Image (tube, grey):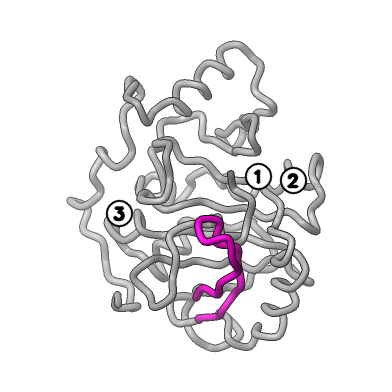
Amino acid sequence: MYDTQPENTPASRLDPKNCGEPGDHGPRDGLWLKVQECISAGNCVDVDKAQRCAVMHGGLVVPIDRVKGIECYTIWQPGAPNYWHSAWEYVCKHMPPASTGLGINSKSARTKDQLHIHMADFHERASGDLVHELKGQQKNMAPYSGKSWAESLVTATGWVASAQKWEQRKYRAHHVLNLGSNLFETLQKEVAPSSERMQEQTMIVIPAPQGFYVLNSEKGIRDGTSTCDYLLRCN
């Protein structure tokens, strides 16, 4: 199990290879090529020029700059685009906010090497009981628990498609009143201080009675997960 205490990240570990190059065109770079094409053709579903991202078919929010995934250090730097805020603004205009969540997979769980945030419905059971369960456990969450996000663990039930059954997973839980702050920056500071740690993380944002629950997990914690698929219909 990983140590939960953040550590300083040496500048030498901010490897540009974790972000990719604009000219990349490998077998996992299709989403990067598609977002460039839709920007050029002017036929993306939506574009947020201020936050440097586009909405693609399939409910994906994708940076219009080269960002391979959650391990890319540029997304947690001060002044980085707030893709989460942009995604939620789109949800509020075009999707049912009460039953929609946002999620991103870890490097090992994704199939595309361009960062993308899923905007997706909860699974049926999750949509009915997840908010209720987490509301009851809010005292265990940062900042209410007095602990850091890294130390605030809750249990949530999700759907395991490969086994066709419901199972519980452990998540680090944080409550925020809004999505005005960059969640990638907060995650890097409080939970995963390096690209090596960030690449293992999944993160899910769901609406709370007041604000949002931000859940994070990885395979390195007991009963953890590296994917948002258990809680959201990401596929």
Q: Position of residue 5 (x, y in %)?
A: 33, 78
The segment highlighted magenta reads 153-170
Secondary structure of the residue carrying numbered label 1: helix
Give the labeled residue for mark 3: 195
- Please give the label number shown on residue 91: 2
**What's the distance in space between the residues labelled 3 and 2, CA to CA?**
29 Å
Secondary structure of the residue carrying numbered label 2: helix
Residue nearer the viewer, 87 or 14: 87
Q: Position of residue 65 (x, y in %)?
A: 45, 30
Most distant residue in the front direction: 164
Q: Is residue 96 left or right of residue 115?
A: right
- Please give the label number shown on residue 31: none
- Amino acid type, label 3: Ser
Q: Is residue 36 left or right of residue 136?
A: left
Mark yes or no: residue 15 visible: yes
- Amino acid type, label 2: Val
**What's the distance in space between the residues labelled 2 and 1, CA to CA?**
6 Å
- Amino acid type, label 1: Ala
Q: Position of residue 116 (x, y in %)?
A: 52, 41
Secondary structure of the residue carrying numbered label 3: helix
Give the labeled residue for mark 1: 87
Residue, x 21% and y 52% (percent of image)? 13
Most distant residue in the left direction: 12
Residue nearer the viewer, 76 or 170: 170
**What's the distance in space between the residues labelled 3 and 1, CA to CA?**
23 Å
